Amino acid sequence: MSGPYSKFCGGGTDNDGNMEDCITIAELAGGGYVLGDSKPEGTGRELRMSASEITAFAEGWLTEHGPAA
């Protein structure tokens, strides 16, 4: 990886501040990204995507679901 993980969190925190519903993402050295799950059972599970793959996914998601309110 070429940088630290960042967290992008959604709802479902049960107002306890633990922020378990987060997607972690870090840039890979040489290009691409690694995505993870912040929940304890997600430890060690990663999804690696090229820049074009993650862009296509994000564009497809926004087309289907619209931007967040």
Image: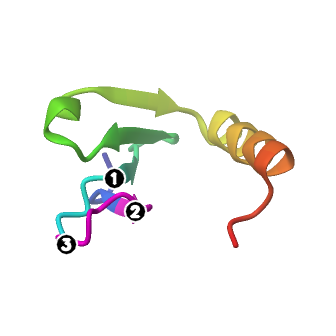
* Disc 3: CA contacts within 10 A as few (<14), some (14-19) or many (>=20): few
Q: Residue at x 26, y 63 (%)?
A: 14
Q: Which mark is residue 17?
A: 3
Q: Which residue is mark 1?
A: 21
* Disc 1: CA contacts within 10 A as few (<14), some (14-19) or many (>=20): some
Disc 1 to disc 2, C-alpha distance: 6 Å
The secondary structure type at the circle numbered 3 is: loop
Q: Are marks 1 and 2 in contact (CB under 8 Å)?
A: yes
Q: As displayed, is residue 5 above or below residue 47?
A: below
Q: Residue at x 17, y 70 (%)?
A: 16
User: Where's residue 11, x and y in %?
Assistant: 42, 62
Q: Quadrant of residue 48?
A: top left
The secondary structure type at the circle numbered 1 is: loop
Q: Which residue is mark 2?
A: 9
Residue kind at label 3, given as amino acid type: Gly
User: Where's residue 67, x and y in %?
Assistant: 75, 63
User: Where's residue 61, x and y in %?
Assistant: 73, 43
> As drawn, is 29 to the left or to the right of 66?
left
Q: Tell me the quarter of the image containing the C terminus.
A: bottom right
Q: Which residues are magenta?
A: 7-16
* Disc 2: CA contacts within 10 A as few (<14), some (14-19) or many (>=20): some
Q: As displayed, is residue 7 above or below residue 58?
A: below
Residue kind at label 2, given as amino acid type: Cys
Mark 2 vs mark 3: in front: 3
Camera-side residue: 17 or 9? 17
Q: Tell me the quarter of the image containing the N terminus.
A: top left
Secondary structure mostly seen in the magenta stretch: loop
Q: Residue at x 33, y 52 (%)?
A: 21
Disc 3 to disc 1, C-alpha distance: 11 Å
